[in-house]
């Protein structure tokens, strides 16, 4: 049962200024979970896009079951037996689960056939679905299930999963792994794209490690540890991060008291009586599964939404709940929302111009309404150098940067103004381990220099690694804070699933 | 073996030199295509093209006419770029132009027997106010009631035209005009000064160039221009930055309306000299093409206004000397737009023929 299903030989793909895949060669065994591990920008996405017919390689051969494999579109790839579940779901939010499934089918199929098939798939692979529920009502895990079922309807031999656990709760991850195991038992092959080391060890049989477009190693995951994988993936030693409470002062400088907000919108979560306090130099984490009110809370913390029903926000003894973003920045409060492209940065504008989105009183970027370009450029160059942003220059468009680089730039922009408090949502969402590491380090360093930080994140590892206190948001309610050093993962998992003892 | 169909690949760096040549290349290609069309219609292409593009501007008078037509086009187009950069689709510039002509022209009629240095500046100011007020109506509707500005600004064009209609057949009719639907003429000091004796090109051109320069400065050097741009690219980012988007919508509409209003006033106090029904051959609508043809850039808009003005003149000459419908002018407007957009694409992307695996 260990014969090869896919041979990848000498695949090379270059883009302007960068070679994404350099003579990539490895084999994928049938009936196994094969991991591709690497930072973002390592070339994982390019490789799977080639397999899925979204990109055409410049050179190289792919053989599926010892036959030449060449596809020009995802539809062809699916026909040949390769399916893919993307990190970002491509579902129609306003349609029901069933309608979404029907839309995803390439061939004709009758309703009753479909329902039979669905039942079969649901029970066989531990994928329960409510067919009539609208997609908006589903959690990220359920949406992913819809995506998986949609692909399974086409009976693929190889299933590509791109960072599948990035949006799931610990419980949902467990359930996904059960599904994946069931699929493999049936003789299918899973190509598992990830940058999470623990997952590679716990679920994958073989791992291919990519770095800068090249294959570093393909080997069995037996006898590997997170450390050995990380060293191969990053090519450098990771420093261990340690929670340090010593520098935190007793003084509370940011307090949210009984904030409630109703939206009257099925797409938004109402906030219910949210309170928390942040002390000087403290990193306060807000955990939770996406869609439990994080972005709604973030908008209220940044001042993008000042229409709250009740409650107050106090900063340095000033009531600021009615202040807009600029007035808050004037008090040295800085923010980084979750979305880089189009929210914390404008992709069409240059890096220099993007500096101007976030101005603090001491920046001196504007005089009498006129932009002082030299000051802005100097500031941009400083951020680029200090935070090691890889870019041809400050005139490069924000859209030309990789996710990790742009995030380093955006966070660098905020940190460089030395704010008294930084409010940041999903600081390392969808970026590579190298950038992730350097961003977390700079956040810790910032807190040690006396800045308070509020981190909203779905990534529990991240919160445990960097925060001093964590509370969990669920359905618009915020739990009491827990000291990070004393916290139990199971407890958090339960709170995230809405079970409060 | 290479694949039959090219694929479009992004260029890492677009050539600055080619960027400069785009308009020239587009014009050459337009002329080639145009001559093919003329051959198909049975005309000598050299003669036809000459009639269309050269003869209208082969005299000083022709060149002056080119500037007379380009002046309102460029002025409205630069005003429209305040809106378009902010992703506001104000297509009611024709109405704002009309309202500018009514307000400014109204002042001119009120002082029709006065000759004073302050009259023209007052008319220009009133024209700007009239256009701006008319532009603010869709702005208020958009920000207060969330209406679609495309519809409201367009419908207000016809309201403005009817108001003008009413005025010139009713209260503002020339008492010595034998019941023609027109007003009495403005006084001499209520007219745009001519730049050269015997030519119709007028002071409006200077105002236009000045406002284009000011706009270039605002777009590229000021935080206001930056805010317009950011809010156009991404309203969320603008909100994050704390820019007041309601204010930006108001300013964009008011500035655009004011510019269109000045253009309208410049028409009636320039070449026309009084108020009547047909003060504008759709300058307010054609300026939308000019704005996009000029890529919302001040220099581009100057160039585009001249090209489009030439198609106006060429169509008139073609009708006169070749007996072909003046709609041929639209064909040339379309061709120029097509080649410009095509060249624009090829500057940022290239076609490659992939080797087949």
Image: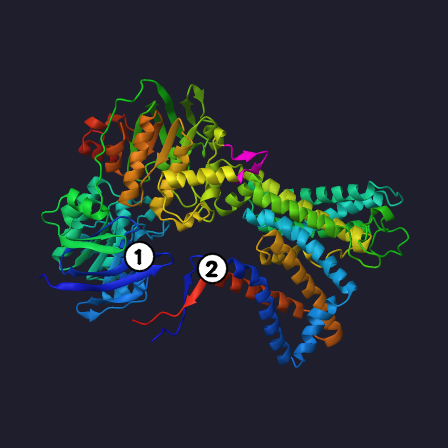
Q: Which mark is residue B348?
A: 2
Tag 1 and tag 2 share a subunit? no
Please name the residue shown 28% across and 54% down the image. A43
Across and down, in percent, residue A32 comes to 14, 56
Q: Is residue B170 visible?
A: yes
* Parent chain of label 2: B
* Parent chain of label 1: A
Q: Residues within 10 Å of mark 1 (few under 14, many from 20)?
A: many
In the picture, the quarter occupied by the C terminus of chain A is top left
Please name the residue shown 73% across and 72% down the image. B319
Across and down, in percent, residue A425 comes to 35, 36
Q: Is residue A474 left or right of residue B238?
A: left
Q: Residues within 10 Å of mark 2 (few under 14, many from 20)?
A: some
Above or below residue A250? Residue A395 is: below
Give the camera-side residue of A347 and A285.
Answer: A347
Which residue is under mark 1?
Answer: A20
């Amino acid at each position: 049962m260990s014969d090869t299903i896919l041979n990848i030989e000498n695949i090379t793909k270059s883009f302007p200024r960068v070679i994404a895949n350099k003579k990539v060669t490895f084999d994928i065994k049938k009936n196994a979970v094969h991991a591709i591990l690497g930072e973002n920008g390592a070339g994982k996405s390019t490789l799977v896009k080639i397999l899925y017919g979204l990109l055409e390689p410049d050179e190289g051969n792919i053989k599926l079951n010892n036959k030449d494999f060449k596809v020009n579109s995802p539809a062809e790839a699916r026909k040949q037996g390769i399916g893919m579940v993307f990190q970002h779901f491509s579902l129609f939010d306003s349609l029901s689960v069933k309608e979404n499934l029907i839309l995803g089918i390439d061939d004709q199929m009758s309703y009753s056939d479909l329902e039979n098939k669905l039942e079969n798939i649901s029970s066989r692979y531990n994928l329960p679905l409510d067919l009539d529920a609208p997609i908006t009502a589903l959690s990220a895990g359920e949406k992913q299930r819809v995506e998986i079922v949609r692909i399974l309807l086409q009976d693929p031999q190889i299933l590509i999963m791109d960072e599948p656990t990035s949006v799931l709760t610990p419980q949902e991850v467990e359930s996904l792994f059960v599904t994946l195991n069931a699929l493999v038992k049936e003789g299918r092959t899973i190509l598992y794209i990830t940058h999470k080391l623990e997952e590679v060890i716990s679920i994958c049989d073989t791992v291919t490690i990519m770095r800068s477009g090249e294959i570093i190693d393909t080997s069995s995951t037996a006898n590997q540890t997170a450390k050995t994988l990380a060293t191969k993936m990053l090519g450098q030693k990771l420093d261990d991060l340690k929670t340090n409470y010593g520098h935190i002062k007793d003084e509370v400088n940011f307090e949210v008291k009984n904030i409630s907000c109703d939206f009257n919108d099925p797409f938004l979560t109402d906030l219910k009586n949210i309170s928390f306090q942040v002390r000087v130099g403290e990193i306060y984490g807000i955990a939770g599964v996406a869609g439990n009110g994080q972005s709604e809370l973030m908008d209220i913390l940044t001042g993008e939404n000042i229409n709250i029903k009740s409650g107050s926000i106090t900063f340095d003894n000033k009531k600021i709940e009615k202040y807009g973003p600029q007035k808050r920045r004037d008090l040295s409060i800085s923010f980084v929302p979750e979305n880089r492209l189009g929210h914390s940065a404008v992709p069409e504008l240059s890096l220099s111009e993007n500096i101007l989105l976030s101005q603090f009183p001491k920046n001196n970027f504007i005089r009498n309404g006129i932009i002082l370009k030299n000051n802005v450029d100097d500031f941009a160059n400083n951020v680029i150098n200090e935070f090691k942003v890889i870019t041809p220059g400050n005139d490069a468009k924000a859209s030309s940067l990789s996710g990790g680089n742009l995030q380093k730039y955006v966070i660098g922009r905020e940190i460089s103004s030395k704010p008294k408090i930084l409010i940041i949502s999903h600081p390392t969402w969808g970026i590579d381990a190298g950038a992730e590491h350097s961003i977390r380090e700079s956040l810790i360093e910032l807190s040690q220099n006396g800045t308070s930080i509020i981190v909203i994140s779905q990534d529990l590892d991240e919160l445990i690694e960097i925060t001093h206190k964590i509370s969990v948001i669920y359905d618009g309610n915020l739990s009491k804070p827990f000291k990070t050093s004393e916290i139990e993962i199971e407890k958090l998992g339960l709170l995230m699933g809405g079970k409060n003892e | 073996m290479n694949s039959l169909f090219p694929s479009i690949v992004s260029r890492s760096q677009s050539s600055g030199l080619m960027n400069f040549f785009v308009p020239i290349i587009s014009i050459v290609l337009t002329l080639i295509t145009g001559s093919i069309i003329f051959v198909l219609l049975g005309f000598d292409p050299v003669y036809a093209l000459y009639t269309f593009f050269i003869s209208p501007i082969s005299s000083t008078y022709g060149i002056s006419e080119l500037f007379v037509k380009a002046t309102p086009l460029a002025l409205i187009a630069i005003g429209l770029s305040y809106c378009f950069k902010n992703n506001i689709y104000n297509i009611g510039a024709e109405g704002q132009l009309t309202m500018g002509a009514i307000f400014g022209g109204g002042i001119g009629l009120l002082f029709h027997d006065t000759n004073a240095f302050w009259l023209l500046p007052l008319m220009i100011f009133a024209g700007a106010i009239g256009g701006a007020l008319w532009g603010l109506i869709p702005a208020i509707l958009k920000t207060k009631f969330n209406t679609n500005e495309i519809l409201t600004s367009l419908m207000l064009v016809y309201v403005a035209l009817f108001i003008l209609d009413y005025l010139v057949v009713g209260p503002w009719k020339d008492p010595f005009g034998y019941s023609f639907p027109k007003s009495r003429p403005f006084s001499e000091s209520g007219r745009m000064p001519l730049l050269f004796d015997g030519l119709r090109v007028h002071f409006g051109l200077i105002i236009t160039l000045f406002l284009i320069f000011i706009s270039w400065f605002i777009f590229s050097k000021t935080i206001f221009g930056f805010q317009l741009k950011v809010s156009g690219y991404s309203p969320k980012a603008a909100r994050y930055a704390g820019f007041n988007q309601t204010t930006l919508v108001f300013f964009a509409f008011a500035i655009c309306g004011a510019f269109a209003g000045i253009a309208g006033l410049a028409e009636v106090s320039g070449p026309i000299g009084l108020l009547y029904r047909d003060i504008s051959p759709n300058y307010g609508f054609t300026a939308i093409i000019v704005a996009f043809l000029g890529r919302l850039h001040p220099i581009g808009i100057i160039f585009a206004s001249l090209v489009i003005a030439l198609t106006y003149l060429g169509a008139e000459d073609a009708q006169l000397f070749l007996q072909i419908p003046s709609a041929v002018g639209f064909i040339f407007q379309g061709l120029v737009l097509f080649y410009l957009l095509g060249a624009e694409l090829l500057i940022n992307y290239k076609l490659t023929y992939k080797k087949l695996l």
